[in-house]
Image (spheres, rainbow, N blue to C red):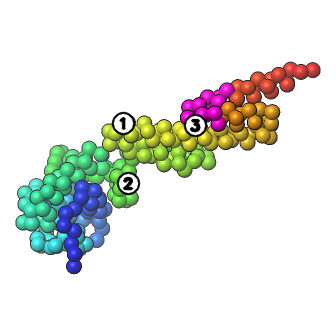
Amino acid sequence: MSFITELSNLEIRNLLLEVLAYEGNDIDTEGKTFKLYGYQGSQSDLFRLLNGLLIKKKIKEPLVSMWGEAWGCHGRVLYEYSSINLSRIEILKLYQEFHKLLTQGVIAPGAYGHYGTDLPYFHVTEYGMECIKQMDVLPYDQDGYLTKLKAIKNIDDWVVFYLTEALKCFNADCINSSMINIGLAGEVIIEKLTDSFSSFLIKNEPSLHSTFISDLNKDWKISHKYNVYLDFQDKYVKATKDVSVKP
């Protein structure tokens, strides 16, 4: 049997999400899960169940056995292949990804009841519950922007995709990448506008259509296309007004 030699940050993050969502009774010697305890507990609970999941899924060579502990214990120090089936660098990655889940709002310090208000105790947030259901860190959308966006009738799938990616980048503090995706969404919208307006002119103002297409193709830049669209929209309005005032 071949085992993974070294887990990546992404693989460790996904395993953490899987542990938080896990509902089986076979990754802890006493069958404990985060679901049983209201999706809250301590870092020790999370790391212990992660070790059980590594054994269950046969991801790493099981040098450290599965163990049980009272839920909410303060925690044991992690040493490579001594208290967990991870190497030193993987343990550091584990700490990195745990704190990323904190900064991304998937989990938050403190737990209800006798646990305590600070780390090592934590709880899964409402947003985090959605993430663990999907087994992915979803775009953090505090105001429900994406839900409102998707509710728009006939909205283009690419617009939704690019704006979703933009929100992901914004959440990760990658502002430039976020702006690029917003720009790409804008390009899709402008292409749709110009295509729709072209079809409209063919039916309603054929004399403007050929000139519109000619001007549109003079430059590939999307800003040019949008300016041409605005210009010809204005020309159409003026043309229809002129017609309406004729005796």
Q: Which residues are magenta?
A: 217-231
Determine the residue positioned at 32% across, 39% down. 173
Judged by its main secondary structure, the magenta piece is: helix
Q: State which tag comes first along the sequence, 3 or 2.
A: 2
Front in this rendered view, residue 36 or 240: 240
Q: Is residue 220 magenta?
A: yes
Q: Does residue 90 appear anywhere in the picture?
A: yes
C-alpha distance separating marks 3 and 1: 26 Å
| Residue 29 place in picture, x, y as percent | 16, 73
| Residue 159 x %, y % | 53, 45
User: Given this view, does label 3 or label 2 mark the residue nearer the observer?
Assistant: 3
Element type at marker 2? helix
Amino acid carrying mark 1 in the image:
Ile
Residue 51: x and y in percent read 17, 66
How many angstroms separate mark 2 from mark 1 (CA)?
24 Å
Determine which residue is flagged by label 1. 175
The secondary structure type at the circle numbered 1 is helix
For disc 3, the neighbor class at 10 Å (few under 14, some 14 to 19, many from 20) is: few
Q: Is residue 161 above or below residue 37?
A: above
Identify which amino acid the numbered label 3 is placed on.
Trp
Q: Residue at x 61, y 46 (%)?
A: 153
Q: Report the label total.
A: 3
Check if mark 3's residue and mark 1's residue have beta carbons within 8 Å. no
Q: Secondary structure at mark 3?
A: loop
Residue 220: give its label: 3
Q: Residues within 10 Å of mark 2 (few under 14, many from 20)?
A: some
Determine whether, in the image, residue 161 is placed left or right of residue 204: left
- Location of the C terminus (image quadrant): top right
Between tags 3 and 1, which lies in front?
A: 3
Q: At 56% from the left edge and 42% from the top edge, which residue is drawn?
A: 188
